[in-house]
Amino acid sequence: MISVVIPVYNEEKNLELLQTELSQVLASLGNYEVIYVDDGSKDDSFEVLTKLKSCGANIRVIQLTKHFGQTEAMQAGIDCSAGDVIVFMDADLQNEPKDIPKLLSKIKEGFTAVSGWRKKREDPFLTRRLPSYIANMLISKISKIKLHDFGCSLKAYRREVITQIRLYSEMHRFIPIYIARQGAPIAEVEVSHRRRAAGDSKYGMMRFFKVILDFLVAEFINNYLNKPMYVFGSAGILSIFFGGCICVFIVIRKIFFGGVWVSPLLFIVIISIIVGFQFILMGFIAELMIRLYYENTKARTYRIKKEL
């Protein structure tokens, strides 16, 4: 069974055409469901979805109490889905439903996750495509996951993998990174991209900075969640080392060049050493919290691929 999860926020003018196109594509793919998650829309999106639900047995509608964000809406869709494969896409009609079979064919080939690549984007260059290109290049370089378009919402995942990840903040765009680092094979396929026909874009220049900050959080969770002392301890040692070097400089200056003891450099030494010890103490506290988390939740620090 295929579950198509679509977060909706103020898209009343696009929903009927979207459902028409989806029905035409999915009808030939067998058993399916379309899950619309109304993320606190302020227009008549929910009323339109209610109308669509009354006309289609394969449609499910979830209305959230307020606008939580795209990632939380996607998590709600995952929790309510029943499909073996879960496909995500936007409700703004810029993703084309006819590309869904491309993603599913890659899933059938054995890939765990398939990400869309909007190679020919129909967006403004300066405010959308350029920031997206820079962000994708940085994320791919740092994460070492070779994808061209982390921001494309059109993606497909096997259920057994996506349900092991809890989504929050802006994590949805980094799901392929989490999955790839668990050893699961991922693929990327070129998909179509259309101009927005109706409604307003929910993305702006500020999204670029949010994406970079969220990526740094994702990198920390991926690489240092089980060993936070490596981050805080390293910062603390560097700070103490920096303060120690300045302290040696003050002593040499006083003994050999007749300098003064009390100067702005002395205060930098004191602050650096204090900050260094604080970082190390933060590392100890973080280590204790991680150990308490794993002990109380019985969460695994590994993922088994196969048992014989």
Image (cartoon, rainbow, N blue to C red):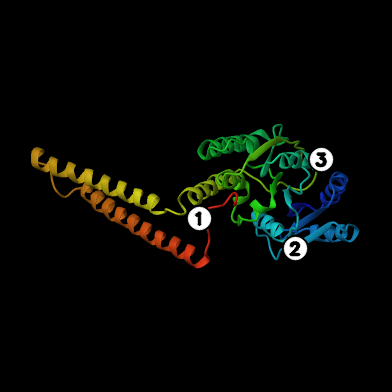
The residue type indicated by label 2 comes to Gln
Please give left or right for residue 302 compared with residue 73 in the image. Answer: left
Q: CA distance from mark 2 to mark 3?
A: 26 Å
**Do the CB atoms of the residues marked 2 and 1 lie less than 8 Å apart?**
no
Query: Measuring 22% from the left and 46% from the top, which residue is drawn there?
Result: 244
Towards the viewer: 151 or 202: 151
Q: What amino acid does circle 3 point to? A: Lys
Q: Which residue is mark 3?
A: 98
Amino acid type, mark 1: Thr
| Left or right relative to 191: residue 289 | left
Image coordinates for residue 107, horizontal then vertical, percent: 72, 42
Name the residue tied to disc 2. 63
The residue depicted at 30 percent of the width and 53 percent of the height is 276
Q: In the image, which is nearer the foreground, mark 2 or mark 3?
A: 3
Image x and y of residue 58, in percent: 85, 56
State how far apart marks 2 and 1 are (Cα).
34 Å
- At label 1, counting other C-alpha atoms closer than 10 Å, the crowd grade (few under 14, some 14-19, many 20 or more) is few
Does 255 sit left or right of 121 as displayed?
Answer: left
User: Is residue 256 shown above or below 73?
Assistant: above
Helix, strand or loop at mark 1: loop
Pick whichever of labels 2 and 3 is earlier in the sequence.
2
The image shows residue 95, relative to residue 69, as above or below, that is: above
The residue most toward the bottom is 296
Q: Is residue 1 left or right of residue 215?
A: right
For mark 1, what is the residue?
301
